[in-house]
Amino acid sequence: MTLTTTFKKPHNSPGSTARFSPVLSQAMLGTVGVLLSISASAAPSIYPTGTTRYDPAKAFNSFVLFTGGDNIAHLIDLNGNSVHEWKDAASHSTLIDPAVNGGKLGHVFVTLEMTEGIGTDLVPGQVSRRVAKTVGELDWDGKTVWSFGDKAPGGAAQQHHDWARLPNGNTVVLANLVHPVKGFKQPQVLDDVVYEVNPAGEAVWKWIASEHLNEFGFSPAELKLVRNADIADYLHVNNLKVVGPNRWFAAGDKRFDPENLLFDARNANFIAIIDKKTGKIAWRLGPHYKAASEEQVQPRNVPRPVDQISAQHDAHIIPEGLPGAGNLLVFDNQGLAGYPTAAVPRTGGSRVLEIDPVKNEIVWQYTGEDSGGPAWSFRSTHISAARRLPNGNTFIDEGQSGRLFQVTRDGEIVWEYVNPYVRIGKDKLTGRATANNQLYRGQPVPYEWVPAGTPHSEKAVIPPELSQAGIPPGP
């Protein structure tokens, strides 16, 4: 594995003084060649990538980590320079907070190896479903210092979506378990399981979602829909976080024990906390919410009771020391999900919600309207994430379009980046080349989480006026 810490300028990234290696240059030329061979797509055929706007005085200046379509975990600065890289066989790279990792800087979780998965017919459209065989922790130099896979049940981690390092040195891993579950229409269920794995790569604790169906808040009629679902991936848990220290537990609310685990189920529209000691559900939001109108504009006044959340991602308790600490932050995709399917506005967009988890009230939100556009101008019906930043800004991954950005409390966009590392494929029906720049998750990374001296730039990027951004007409 070749790792670099020199600036490498992505396509159309403004303001970079990057140095290019011959290998990188050839790789980029190859990618450009493939892209040029793709006819105009359904999306806009010409659009900027890399950093498209940046106000260093208003943004929280940091690095950002994500895995692009090139299966490389890129650590970029806010000018879009890829300053460090790790190979990643999937798209879930996560940089580990040194505070829970013995002070080690620049360590990441990545997928080390993929394999063909059992139950390949369980997910519609995935004819040859590949799964994570081995996941691991890489140090700054790319050396594997921990892994999980060969000692996993069945000899494969089958990890998906998320993982987290615990203060005791163990790691919680969100994984799939393919097995029959009594009462389900599907002969094999694609279940969700959480493993706690020790430093030797051995699972020492396990939690299986299907064993807690009666704790998820479904009515008998809804539970019947769940058991008779047409897909085996009936919950599709997409997120796992440690609750962490918080003001609710400090005030005596044991539901928010810092050792407890928080997850959300995309297909079932609920967010829940697992009591780590008992395995039971200690707290839950959903699956029932105040209904949203299919035609009317969703309310924007705060505070207000939580209204219809649907197909959400990246729910977590905002850590201590950050503005809003103790509240729940979640990317509410407003996609189709639920038992029965929730009614969401036809022309609405996605939302980022900050929720008081004791009062179940929305205390802050971000929608497209907050940045001066229509609701649907901010929309990602799947994947995506949101994180609170130390200066009060919120980092948002609009994953569907591969767009990462920061907004202030009042919705001003002070940094924006569009993923240039596209995944090249082929349409199964037509055979045409395809390009996809979606991002499962981006993660803001404070400068101090990586080794000192890691290069970064903080040069302002001022976007052109829209009227001047097009190609001038001919004579």
Image (cartoon, helix red, strand yellow):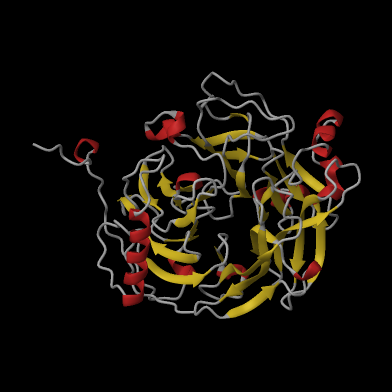
Which residue is outermost to the left? 475
Q: Residue at x 74, y 54 (%)?
A: 257
Which residue is outermost to the front? 430
Foreground pick, 55 / 320: 55
Foreground pick, 51 / 116: 116
Q: Is residue 148 above or below residue 430?
A: below
Q: Is 389 positioned to the left or the right of 130 in the image?
A: left
**Whole-percent x and y of residue 90?**
57, 62
Q: Is 349 positioned to the left or the right of 161 in the image?
A: left
Q: Is residue 283 above or below residue 114?
A: above
When asked about the image quadrant of residue 176, the answer is bottom right
Q: Residue at x 48, y 66 (%)?
A: 72
Which residue is outermost to the top? 296
Q: Residue at x 61, y 39 (%)?
A: 355
Q: Is 106 positioned to the left or the right of 224 in the image?
A: left
Q: Is 245 positioned to the left or the right of 213 in the image?
A: left
**Whole-percent x and y of residue 83?**
39, 69
**Whole-percent x and y of residue 415?**
36, 49
**Whole-percent x and y of residue 371?**
39, 35
Q: Is residue 138 visible?
A: yes
